[in-house]
Image (cartoon, rainbow, N blue to C red):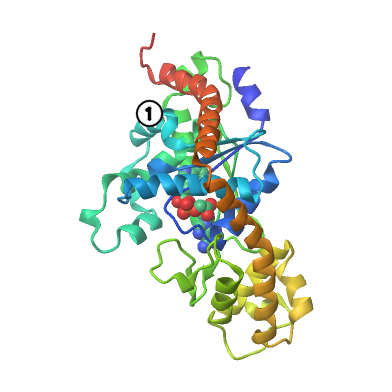
Amino acid sequence: MQRAKTKTKTRVFSGVQPTGNLHLGNYLGAITKFVALQAEHDCLYCVVDLHAITVFQDPDELAKNTREVTAAFIASGIDPGRHIVFNQSQVSGHAELAWIFNCVARIGWLNRMTQFKEKAGKDRENASAGLYVYPNLMAADILLYHATHVPVGEDQKQHLELARDIAQKFNNDFAKTIAREGYEGGFFPLPEPLITGPATRVMNLRDGTRKMSKSDESDMTRINLTDDADAIAKKIRKAKTDPEPLPSEAKGLETRPEADNLVGIFAGLAETSKEAVLRDFGGSPFSKFKEALAELAAAKLNPIGEEMRRLMADPVEIDRILDDGARRAHAIADPILAKTKDIVGFIRS
Ligand code: TYM
């Protein structure tokens, strides 16, 4: 019946936090996937400003970073006319559904989230309550649109599993009213994570055992989307490696995290596999490989950086795109939120 309609239709949702320093990990782990999925699916791509403030953000910086992520989406090839690009705080349903999910998710589930442990660090008492319930908001982002597929990097896998648990528990807890409303097989679909390709976890250039991150103090650990060719070449030249030449097969990368990372980055940028990269570079010294990688990275990223700068010069146009996206996001979210309220037993006019 009604549910059967949403079940057969795929819908992609994903989000990126506007917390500055968009980097190669965000690009290869997420944004390139967003671009590719546009051909076959209806997509919503969200600049998640509500998530960003779980750690204090300077208000002027937050607005600038929100426009910058929007510009990065568009410069990378996301079409805001055919798909939906918006910032989360303009659609209040995210916060409303998150509250309902705060009451569905169990504290024990949240206590297992490794990202909270990492971000809160030793001073957990001093972390914001928002940082703790952040995964419930992320579940709300996805389920507010009955999204079925969620492209993300490897680090978001656990949050996606939690979103599935929340959907499942909601469907069970409210099975009676869900059936009464005429939905078969549950109200919320269980979203599928899409974590694919050779660069789902891009690592820190100075330490192949740590993730490339926006918040790392040293800019030399990451390649930013707005870095110019010289900065990219310098960072790759100085990236940590080991003394051996590159292996000829992917198996040879297993105990070499830095080599594995650079080969994965090359494969991601060249849209090929690590095996194919090693067919070309197996036996080469890092000096030669790094030169080719710097050239490839600059060729791919510099046009994006330039287009981002051009778009950022017209903030009024970016705000118009976000406003239009929010309007179209509302049109999908509002009926789903209204039904959720009926299912929970809230009276509405
Ligand atoms: P965020 O803003 O930290 O990162 C955005 C996307 O980039 C991916 N990513 C990486 N991929 C590979 N290697 C890396 N080093 C790397 N660093 C980041 C992330 O996995 C992510 O896909 N909670 C999310 C944002 C979010 C969201 C959502 C995502 C909020 N609501 C709903 C999907 C669906 C986050 O903090 O991503």
Q: Nearer the viewer, residue 28 or 220?
A: 220
Q: Nearer the viewer, residue 273 or 227?
A: 227
| Horizontal and vertical percent position of residue 45 | 56, 40
Whether residue 91 is situated above or below residue 74 in the rendered picture: above
Is 250 left, or right, of 55 in this rendering? right
| Horizontal and vertical percent position of residue 124 | 25, 57
**Total numbered badges shown on the rendered structure:** 1
Q: Nearer the viewer, residue 133 or 91?
A: 91
Whether residue 305 is situated above or below residue 331 in the rendered picture: below
User: At x 61% / y 70%, what residue is drawn?
Assistant: 229
Disc 1 under 8 Å from ligand 1? The reply is: no
Residue position marked by numbered label 1 in the rendering: 96
Element carrying mark 1: helix
Q: Which amino acid type is marked by label 1?
A: Glu
User: At x 68% / y 44%, what residue is drawn?
Assistant: 37
Identify the residue at the far top of this view.
349
Badge 1: residue crowd in 10 Å (few <14, some 14–19, many ≥20):
some
| Horizontal and vertical percent position of residue 165 | 46, 41
Whether residue 3 is situated above or below residue 87 in the rendered picture: above
| Horizontal and vertical percent position of residue 208 | 51, 75
User: At x 57% / y 87%, what residue is drawn?
Assistant: 242
Residue 4 location, quadrant: top right
Residue 256 location, quadrant: bottom right
Point out the image quarter for the N terminus: top right
